[in-house]
Image (cartoon, rainbow, N blue to C red):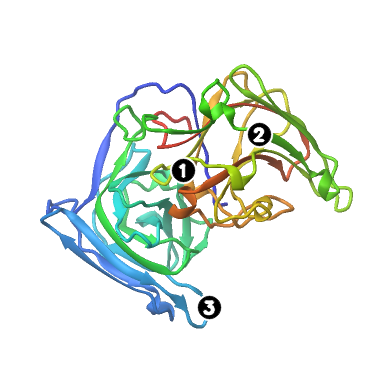
Amino acid sequence: MAWWVLAVWCLIPVAAKTVLVVTFDGKPGTTWQWKTMDDPVMGGVSKSAFYADSERAVGVWDGEVRTVPFLKQPGFCNLQAPPMFDTADFPDLSGTDGLIVRARQTNSSGLTNFSVMLMTKGAAHLEKQGVYTATFVLTDTLQEHYLPFTAFTCAWQGHNVSWCPDVKTQLAQITNVGLGTAIPGPTGKFHLEISSVSATTFGEQLLSSTVGDITLAAFDGTKQSQITWNAINDTAAGGQSTCNFEVRDGYADYTGICRAMLSTESPGFARAITGLPTLAHFEDISNTDGIILCLRSLEANVTRFTFAFCDSHINLYRCEYASFKASFELIPSTAFSEVFLPWSAFSDQWSQSTGRTAKSPPHGESLRSVSQLQLWTEGVVGRFHVQLRYVLAGRVPATLLV
């Protein structure tokens, strides 16, 4: 499944550990030989080139993803160190919790969704080499993008596999590191500058403090509290689910019952949404890492929810079924907590009957033009009671309980 969730409680400062994995400054132990590996090896026509700019200490990766002729689908471009069939002794990352990729995309109209890849000794299965990957969204600003190891999935030739060990058991056995264009993803050109890849523990020093977060919605009397929310049930589609969304003192109360549809007997849906997409003007959130929700669930048996948003390219009628969605689990508790949803968890390819998504995260142009926020209960039958304090777009929270 293409989503992952991190719940955070109060931000408690802890000591951080950082290990450099990749640099382009010529230092031994972190400077590696890189080589592109594009889809022509599989019948495609995509092409990329790489060189290290030692004066600026960055790696420059330039290319274009094109449609594979016989598949009629976008291909891919990959970059790997060391090259295929070679391995290297990378630093031991045991005890760290994720990677930080410091990079930017300098082509203003280019691709924005990329992945980082890890190969390890223990992920080999017979003659197959599993690859651990996690996706992120680049902007034109050189900045850090944090990817916890819980975000990594293991694949072979683009298909997820179950025979790879947990990536956190492999951190002392890394043999190769790579970057790739997102699969599946669109065609287009790209021009990346990569400054470094490092591994880190969560901590106060982590770049992802909540400073600089953008408030999209709140219920505390601020400007964002003036946004109107509406409760929408599935009755218009022949369902019998019910829900309410009421603003209280400092939070919103989202309650209801999700029932099976009469016609199909599959679970219906309930949701709370902000006003008409054609009238909304949310801030540009393309320089953030994802959505942060502060909420809690009270005495209800539904634990799976979905947060979604539309952008200005999704018109009023398509916003109903083509929003960008990410699911998360919320266990009943009396305490408010934060749930972080990275952009790689969102997709606009999802099933109307189950809410399950394919892997198709938003691009920068979508994050620059958010037009509606949505909180869904779908794909389940039961009672729910959620209280929501705020919706932020920001960096990965500093202290996380995974």
Above or below residue 124? Residue 234 is above
Task: Judge the density around disc 2: few (<14), some (14-19), many (≥20) Cα neighbours within 10 Å.
Answer: many
Amino acid carrying label 1: it is: Thr
Q: What is the x, y in percent for residue 95?
A: 34, 36
Which residue is painted at 73% across and 28% down in the image?
A: 255
Residue that label 3 marks: 72
Q: Residue at x 65, y 19 (%)?
A: 248
Q: Is residue 225 left or right of residue 253?
A: left
Q: Nearer the viewer, mark 2 or mark 3?
A: 2
Report the residue marked by disc 1.
150
Residue corresponding to mark 2: 229
Q: Determine the image quadrant of residue 198.
A: top left
Amino acid marked by disc 3: Lys
Of 1 and 278, the residue lying toward us: 278
Question: As drawn, is 37 to the left or to the right of 214?
Answer: left
| Mark closest to the chain's N terminus, 1 or 2 | 1
